Image (tube, rainbow, N blue to C red):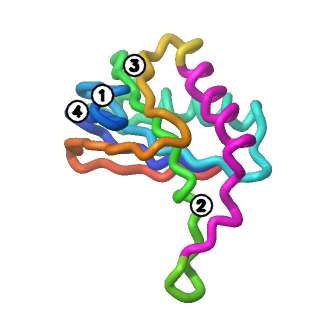
Amino acid sequence: MRALIQTVSRASVTVGDEVVGKIEDGLLVLLGVTHTDTVETAATMARKVHELRILDDERSAADVGAPLLVVSQFTLYGDARKGRRPSWLAAAPAEVAEPLVTAVMDALRARGATVETGRFRTHMLVESINVGPRTVLLDL
């Protein structure tokens, strides 16, 4: 499982004309799933994301109650080492990835986090205003 995490002053996801998720002063989490990920991997990722000390004064979302916008992002597993067309072979298929993305969000909510999300298998417009900018890649 791979997460690209950015501190944001605001972020949102729009599908069609509908804003389906939005946050202010929190973390935008782009989340990719690979074939070997499990529910245990999802729980570990949720803990790491929630406790990551990326906010001001080395605090975490757990410390300050910052909201998270979690967006499924299979392209985090794109491999463009050969040629110009990325390969997506390392990305888990949607039927495997969707329940694991949901498991990460459920684990975050169980920890008390406020979680917004996009909509799986749709064309999403993701907007964000990065703070810092601070961006961290977590790879489990």
Q: Which residue is mark 3?
A: 63
Residue at the spot of label 1 = 19
Outermost residue on the bottom side: it is 83
* Numbered tag placed on residue 77 in the rendering: 2
Secondary structure type for disc 4:
strand
**Residue type marked 3:** Asp
Badge 2 amino acid? Tyr
Q: Nearer the viewer, mark 1 or mark 3?
A: 1
Residue 85 x %, y %: 53, 79
Residue name at image x 58 percent, y 30 percent: 46
Residue 31 sits inside the magenta stretch: no
On residue 69, which mark appears? none
Q: Residue at x 69, y 31 (%)?
A: 99
Question: Alpha-carbon neighbours of circle 3 within 10 Å: few (<14), some, or many (≥20)?
Answer: few
Q: Residue visible at 55% across and 42% down?
A: 121
Looking at the image, residue 56 lies above or below residue 86: above
Whole-percent x, y for residue 70 in the image:
46, 34
Over which residues does the magenta segment extend? 86-108
